[in-house]
Image (cartoon, rainbow, N blue to C red):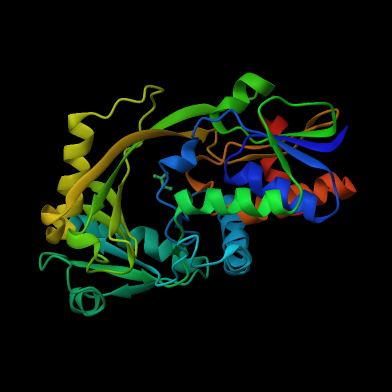
Amino acid sequence: MKDVTVVGAGPIGLAIAWRCAARGMAVEVVDDGLPGAWHASAGMLGPVAEAYFGEAQLTALLVESAKRWPGFAAELGAEEIGYRAEGTLVVALTGDDLAEAERLRAYQAGLGLPITPLRPTELRDREQLLSPRVRGGAHAPDDHQVNPRRLVPALRKAATAAGVAIVRESGPAGVTVIAAGTGSAALTGLPVRPVKGQILRLRAPGHQPPGFSHVIRGYADGRHVYLVPRLDGEVVVGATVEERADAHVTAGGVVELLRAAADLVPEIYEYELAEAIAGHRPGTPDNAPLIGPHSDGVIVATGHYRHGIVLTPLTADLVADLVETGQLDPILGPFAPGRFA
Ligand code: GLY
């Protein structure tokens, strides 16, 4: 019998399994073979730019997990997983966009988070490809990125090397950890719903690195968009947020994303449109995660919504602590799985 069975082979499940195995536990991961939300995810690690009004406890969790990312990436091989630390530029196209971006930036700065306002010339000094129409923005130096499609194979490798068995069917175990994203609802009865996101992958000519290196989080005529540049020439452009469970890519979704992205970085008109897919974020009634004991012998780590990649290191460490010691870190208090009962 295993000490721990982890149901779910996305970043969260694999990282939990890896951390538990590193502490000497016998661990298996149940993988249904289907790509989860991570397969669509851009991999932004944005604790500052994603610190939204009314989410102070979630922001604290994001900040704590982001602090662990440099060490976590180094363990896996930062280059191998596409970890980049150039930071994020917030970019606003119109006066109204700038007013909206500034409100949030002032809130974030008021929390003591590192984000500095930038004038249009200062933005273009950092990224010359930005449109001359851009009215202003900000720099969030601690908001980094990773490539989830490299992260997951690296986690599988690390977990396997630590002795984790990856299986199709679960066997008996002392503790079961449910980390199955949107599939967690059927396994636990907890309120996890799919929130559709359409996302694009563009490719710079000649597979050269794109002409910008920061993650760009844009406000463009009332639309929100992000552009995530990779060294292999890929630019991820995302994402729609739709209360739907279908996986269709729509013409409207693609047009809106491309229009907003090209308004900010016109050069992308020349890029190849390499992929357009839809994924499903695991959302909860308050869009904050469910992490902690669920029932006898069952722990859940799910519902990470828009923050699964940034929250991976902290979730893994704290769930491994919980499995090993039975103690729940107080930072997880607000994220109890039973809070909607
Ligand atoms: N975290 C980005 C997204 O959910 O689209």
Indicate whether 176 appears above or below 25: above
Q: Relative to 140, is 18 on the left or the right?
A: right
Between 279 and 130, the one nearer to me in the picture = 279
x and y, in percent, of residue 265 in the image = 17, 60
Q: Which quadrant would residue 60 be assigned to in this image? A: bottom right
Query: Is 227 or 20 nearer to us in this picture?
Result: 20
Q: Is 173 left, or right, of 284 in this rendering?
A: right
Q: Could you tell me how many numbered marks the image carries?
A: 0
84 w.r.t. 199: above or below: below
Residue 329 visible in this rendered orientation of the protein: no
**Depth check, front residue: 269 or 128:** 269
Q: Is residue 268 left or right of residue 6?
A: left
Q: Is residue 143 visible?
A: yes
Which residue is nearer to you in this view: 250 or 151?
A: 151
The residue shown at (35%, 33%) is 278
| Residue 129 sits above or below residue 32 on the image | below
Q: Residue at x 83, y 55 (%)?
A: 23
Across and down, in percent, residue 11 comes to 58, 46
